Amino acid sequence: MKAPILLLTWLILVLVYFFTGNNSVPVQILFKLLPEVVLLAGIAANRSRIERKTFWAVSLALVFSMLGDAAGEMKIGRFTDIAFICQIGLFVVAQILYTCSFCFNIDLKSRPSGATLALKAVPLAIIVAYLGFIGYKVLPAMGGGAFLAAGILYISALLGTGTTSVLQKRPQQFLYIIGAMIFIVSDSVIALNSFVLEQPLPHSHLLIMGTYFVAQLLLNYKLITQ
């Protein structure tokens, strides 16, 4: 499948997800996963052009993201807490895999110029400051036990993804940086809605899933269009 057709298919499936309304859990999971299936198919189609370790890291990152999405739809009744912990755990693995794919492209041998370091310092500062603020707001509200441990682990995983997206060296690197930042925003809205705010943010579902779909696209855009 050529890149323009794949991207159009992805966009249509995202719109279908938002406009289908309330469905049964299996149907909702299906519509939620289809855009990521398209991204996975695009990566698979370009496998010969992608470095082997990068291919497996991003492919598995998408698979674990999809499993996390499915777990998120299982927050029903007495299974809500279990599904939430499972969702966080699966997304932690996905973030670690994205971090690995970025680490593969960090050049430790060359010495960056002062201008390059200055450019990298800005997004790094934004990511660290924003996640620090989210941690300050969310972690005390999570209580203790498994929820707190999961929260600390996930914020750490997001920090790893965000910082390594900046530290790596790749063509059109800004796509990865923006994708990582948007991913962080998406998950932070979930955390604020779940543990801090008395009332969810207006149109939070559109905000959460819209930013999530866009983040996944940006993190994998170069791999599906090269």
Image (cartoon, grey):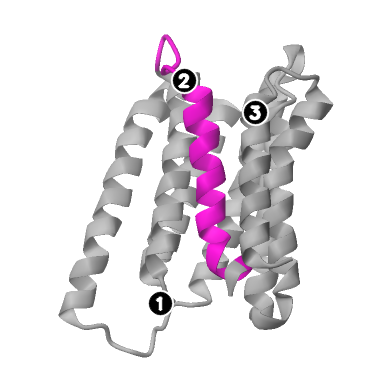
* Marking on residue 203: 2
Tell me which residue sits at (67%, 72%) in the image. Answer: 55
Q: Which stretch did the figure color magenta?
A: 197-224
Residue 201 part of the magenta-drawn span: yes
Query: In this figure, which residue is indicated by the disc labeled 3?
Result: 84
Compared to 95, does 109 lie above or below? below
Mark 2, mark 3: which one is toward the viewer?
A: 2
| Residue 177 pos. (x, y %) | 39, 59
Number of disc labels? 3
Query: Would residue 67 be visible to someone looking at this image?
Result: no
Query: In this figure, which residue is indicated by the disc labeled 1?
Result: 169
| Residue 36 pos. (x, y %) | 68, 49
Mark 1, mark 3: which one is toward the viewer?
A: 1
Query: Would residue 58 be visible to someone looking at this image?
Result: yes
| Residue 67 pos. (x, y %) | 74, 43
Q: Nearer the viewer, residue 200 or 8?
A: 8
Amino acid tagged 1: Lys
**First reached walking from the N terminus: tag 2 or tag 3:** 3
Residue 222 part of the magenta-drawn span: yes
Amino acid tagged 3: Phe
Q: Quadrant of residue 27?
A: top right
Tell me which residue sits at (36%, 34%) in the image. Answer: 134
* Distance (Cα) linking label 1 and label 2: 36 Å
- Residue 210 in the figure: left or right of residue 178: right
Tag 3 secondary structure: helix
Tag 1 secondary structure: loop
Looking at the rendered image, the quarter that the C terminus falls into is bottom right
Q: Mark 3 packing: few (<14 Cα in 10 Å), some, or many (20+)?
A: some
Amino acid tagged 2: His
